[in-house]
Image (cartoon, rainbow, N blue to C red):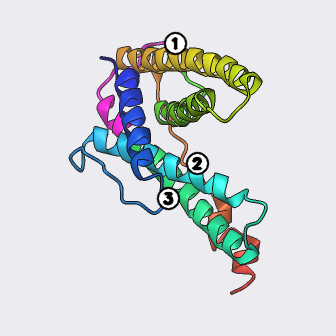
Amino acid sequence: MKFAEKSYKIFEESVADYHIDDDVDAASRNPYPAGSIEHTLYAKNRIDAVQWHLEDIIRDPEIDPVAALALKRRIDASNQERTDMVEELDTYFRELYKGVTVLEGATINTESPAWALDRLSILALKIYHMQAEVDRTDASDAHRARCAAKLAVLTEQRADLTSAIDDLLDDIAAGRKYMKVYRQMKMYNDADTNPVLYGAK
């Protein structure tokens, strides 16, 4: 089984596990050994699953403004954690392919393997929740039909993205493409670069 296909199965497992409790505060059930790439992939999707549901909660029109602010801070922290996890995945790939001889004429990809896997992780959540809409017994036939059409597109996208990621990894392994990782510089989270924060000192 190729890497992206294996990753997607882990993402699906994580999404299903989240919905056992369906609670943003529930403990993770990561079944993989700490330090393994499988553990990191599962943890990455767990972050995405919790944040998906936080984004739902904050859109409640009746939410208390104080609670909404606290939730927004939690979402911001989750975004930073998600970025850190993607960079951890890219570090894994850089180490994995550090001995590859880059061929003359090799090109760089528009995004790193880890950011492509980030999109695949989110796609696993989209597919799960769109399937839930298709299966709703309290929804109209028209609603279920619209969601079924969207689910078909998402399923096609999953096949295309999985294949594209595995092709990219094959190209990097063969030296036809090379990795160049630009660390995310989230200025708004940094007390030294966000003027609102450093102005408050």
Residue 162: % across, % down: 48, 19
How many numbered discs? 3
Check the image and name the residue furthest to the front.
138
Q: Secondary structure at mark 3?
A: loop
User: Is residue 105 shown above or below 121?
Assistant: above
Q: What residue appears at the point 68 percent right and 87 percent down from the top-left corner?
A: 201
- Of circles 2 and 1, which is in front? 2
Q: Residue at x 75, y 74 (%)?
A: 65
**Figure check: 119 above or below 169:** below
Residue 189 vs residue 67, the one in the foreground: 67
Q: Which residues are magenta?
A: 90-105
Which amino acid lies under the numbered mark 1 shown in the image of this protein? Gly
Please rate how many residues cluster around mark 2, counting C-alpha atoms within 10 Å: few if below 14, some from 14 to 19, many from 20.
some
183 is higher (above) or lower (below) than 69: above
Distance (Cα) linking label 2 and label 1: 40 Å
Q: Are marks 3 and 1 in contact (CB under 8 Å)?
A: no
Q: Is residue 37 left or right of residue 163?
A: left
Looking at the rendered structure, the kind of residue marked 2 is: Trp
Residue 137 spot, x, y in % from top left: 62, 32
Residue 52, label in figure: 2
Q: Residue at x 59, y 18 (%)?
A: 157
Which residue is identified by label 3? 24
Q: Earlier in the sequence, mark 3 or mark 2?
A: 3
Residue hosting label 1: 105
Q: Quarter-wise, where is residue 138 in the image?
A: top right
Secondary structure beneath label 2 = helix
